[in-house]
Amino acid sequence: MQHPPLPRSLDPLPGEALDGFLLRLAYRLELSPARIAAIGGITCAGSLLQLSFASLLHLTDEERARFARAVRLLPAEIARLCLSSLGERYAPVSATASRAAANVHGRYSWVFAGATRYCPECLAGDGSRIQNDLGGAWQKAWRLPVVFACTSHGRFLEHLCPGCQRPAHGESGGSNAYALPQLHRAGLHPAQCRYPDRTSVFRDPTARRLCGVSLASAEPPAILPEAGSLQLQDRISDLLNPGLPGVTTSVGLPCSAREYFADLCFLTLLIRRSWPRVKDVRAIGESAEKAMIDDQERIQQLRTDRLSGHRPGRPNLSLPPLDSQVCAALLTTASQLLDSTHPKGLTRQLIHLLEDPRNGDRAQWARNYMNASPGCSAGLSRTLFPALQGYGGKRNLPRKRLIRRTRYEPEHVAQYLQDDWYGRHFAGMTGISPRHLRRAAAIWLCQLAGGGSAAAAARFLDIGADSACNSLHCAQLWARESADPRQLDAALHDLADDLDAAPRLIDYRRRREALRGWCLPSETWQLLCAELPLPDSHARPDLGDRKRQTASILAWVRVTQGDPLLAPHPIRDQQPDEVQKSWRNSTIKVHARFKAGGASAHEIDLRQVLHRYADAIAKAIDHGGVPAHGQV
């Protein structure tokens, strides 16, 4: 049944929430808010006396059109009353989130569903005639945990009724939150508490006496926000304002408002779970420390009540505290961490917080991070990833989704690491075979950029399963038993940072594909040999197929930066088994002499000629060319 439009309506106030608009309009028309919602067609299915919190989050196009017709407004004006109008900047209230948020205390927990904060002075109105009669606006932003202070009046937001000491607009929690208590009751001023009086004993809930205390008449605040908290609130308000750019920085890198709020939420939860460890890494103001201590005492009391059977369930630390002073302390501390311009220092601080036994397994934090909607900023991602999971550690990180977003891709990872990469980041590590270290680091770098399993990364790099498994095991065992278990992880992420900052990245996978099964053509080999200087003695070096195979491997290693043991050797494959073994040993000895600096003059001359040729091949492949393959 479609109702006719209401005889009169109201213009929404700036920033007003849908529930506040219902209260003001109902009071003006001397109707109940439930009646207004029913005429507008936005009450809960099967109930004309309840308004779902999901409706405050978002209304569909059809619902907006129906409600707009009923209250004589435009659908765009109704859309601005919903929390989803802030969703572009604040992801937990986005339209896609809200429609899936029947359980708003689950995945989308960073929005107050069962209650709201408020500023008494804002509710008292601005002195205009309409606000003197109906009060000021109940702001949408008061439902967001990141809004903890009113910067216009320089005070913390309240959350309890000064009369009955229950949360404002609190009705129900759990998986089915409602927008307003006593929605069917008419005649209440929009700023009055709608809770039933605790002394009321009427069996009929519709006849119970209400608290009715004006929330606009709260006492002056005993504690005022510190300057840093107000500055943070100003910054948050600017990021929520759709008329402003909505960009900021996090851990020294630019980020969007959505990413910054995701960062704040993640670190706030970590700080609260690990209190008081944050005091070891960050100075905490006296008032902020007192607020967090009070919060921890309340949490402990809830745990005690649960163990004694007085209160079911357990305190959910994933939900932000309704108390604005506690939230301000947590958010201000988190923002100070995000203002750091030293990612490595912040990584060490986050590791210290994660080491608190109450935080459980870091793999769970990694899953929480990956499931964050939307993802955190690139700055926090770069900083947080080494703290959450080290590749050389004991824990296995779930890799269905990426944590760190890298500029480089898996194809830009050299199979055996470039020599300068290895020399800059890993050469000082002793007690482990360089071959195992180089293979493991290449596999982990590939995983870091592309996700997936270590086995998949090894296949992408053309490293055999047995070789990869052996090298990974040796590297992880060495890392755990070394004096500094995080040394390997730190080097790995430093190299990833270098790759992200590199002006030019090389597609090593293309090079390996171009040289798959390759060896030097005989004609090319003869031309290269002609470039070699004549020997001083009468004894001429052997320049037959065995030397051509070794030279092919040297050139392949130069072009692909690959593992010499994994280089193609088609000439050797055609020889008898005993000859193959002899040739393999010969090639290994040549490499060993180069590494030890004991190569002969002939070998040094040959390497210089091969390097010039290999560099020309690499340039041709990078520009789309294909080198000639030698005849076996």
Image (spheres, rainbow, N blue to C red):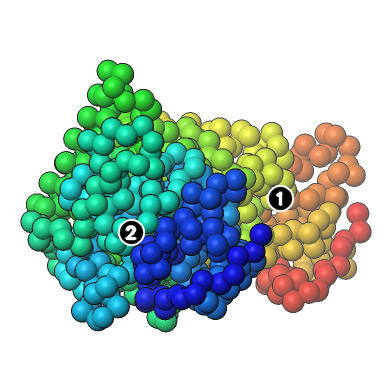
Cα separation, mark 1 vs mark 2, equals 70 Å
Of the residues shown, which amino acid type is indicated by label 1?
Answer: Phe
Q: Residue furthest top?
A: 308
Q: Quadrant of residue 164?
A: top left
Name the element at disc 1. Answer: helix
Q: Residue at x 87, y 63 (%)?
A: 629
Image spot of residue 389 (x, y percent): 46, 42
> Dot 1 corresponds to which residue?
460
Image spot of residue 91 (x, y percent): 48, 61
Which one is nearer the viewer's eye here, 317 or 251?
317
Mark 1 vs mark 2: give the one in front.
2
> Dot 2 corresponds to which residue?
187
Which one is nearer the viewer's eye here, 305 or 276?
305
Q: Quadrant of the N terminus?
A: bottom right
Q: Quadrant of residue 231?
A: bottom left
Asked if residue 206 is positioned above or below residue 500 in the image, the reply reads: above
Q: Residue at x 71, y 59 (%)?
A: 509
